[in-house]
Amino acid sequence: MSFVTTTVRAIGKSKAAAKDADDRTNVSALDRSRRSVRLTTRILAVVLIACLIVVSFGPLLWLFKAALSTSQDILKYPFEWWPSGIQWQNLPDAWSQIRIGQYLLNTVWMAAGCWFFGLLVALTGGYGISILKPRYAKVVNAGVLATLFIPGVVSLISLYVTILDVPLIGVNLVNTYWAVWLPTAASAFNVLLVARFFDRLPRDVFEAAKIDGAGVFRVFWSIVLPMSRPVIGVVSLLTIVGSWKEFLWPLLVLPSPDLQPLSVGLYRVSDTAPTSLLMAGMFISVIIPIALFLMFQRQFLRSAGQAGAIKG
């Protein structure tokens, strides 16, 4: 009798699993049993994946081809693979002749500052709104949220005027990296993202720490930060990528060529540099963040996946 009961339960579970599988797809199990349907779905999957690969890696592959071609081949044979041979010398020539090395160093320094101050503002702002929760926390939260609905172009002029003469201290920040670091750090999106993550942290831990005599700073440093590694990874990735590809604001506040990042430096030399060296410089500027992401993709993806959930 127990054997019959176990068999019936197993059949019921298999039917339920099959039903769940059918609910998750537009093709039923009966249709998938047909050879023509299986062949069609596989062909569609292959075509879709091939299209995604072409769209994703096509421009990068063309840039790689152009970076190792002569200027004449780029303009005359844009879709042929190195008619005059591979020009490996373009990369070191771009590094030295159009100062890619200096622009790259400026970009790294600018991104590092944006990352540090961006994390500082996002973590402390989210900590104050979500965990400390003063009486005016809802007002601050609403004010930060309201800034997301203001287009960046609208506040561009007022922000530039503020950088020209910072209120209270009366300092001109043009041609300094502070003009890029401080506005980038004030990211309402990052503050709200961290605050929503902090909302899901267990409150019992904070209450126990307060009973043990831990202060506000000790709770932040010893409890909140170790539990916030997922959201720190996500904010770090967003901040670094955003600062790396930023163009308009550094163009306005960093007019000196000695301070300009890659995005502005390549634009500045685009009228005078040979096309081949310009393509080589663009390839260097693109491949570095891609290589960093591939090196740390497991950490980034794990952080992105855990940012919306707290492990028990």
Image (cartoon, rainbow, N blue to C red):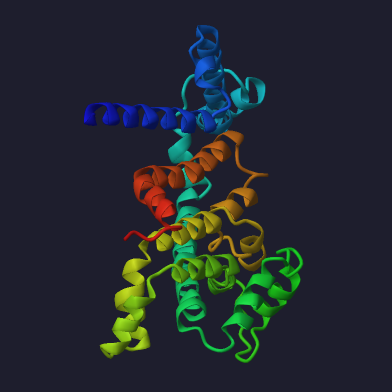
Task: State the image coordinates of residue 303 (x, y, percent, origin top left).
Answer: 39, 54
Which one is nearer the viewer's eye here, 136 or 178? Answer: 136
Residue placed furthest toward the front = 1
Determine whether, in the image, residue 146 is placed left or right of residue 303.
Answer: right
Task: State the image coordinates of residue 214 (x, y, percent, origin top left).
Answer: 29, 87
Q: Residue at x 54, y 17 (%)?
A: 41
Q: Quadrant of residue 295?
A: top left
Q: Residue at x 45, y 73 (%)?
A: 123
Q: Quadrant of residue 160?
A: bottom right
Which one is nearer the viewer's eye here, 202 or 294? Answer: 202
Q: Is residue 106 visible?
A: no
Residue placed furthest toward the top = 35
Decide: is 112 above or below 203.
Answer: above
Q: Quadrant of residue 54?
A: top right
Q: Is residue 72 visible?
A: yes
Which one is nearer the viewer's eye here, 110 or 254? Answer: 110
Decide: is 85 above or below 209.
Answer: above
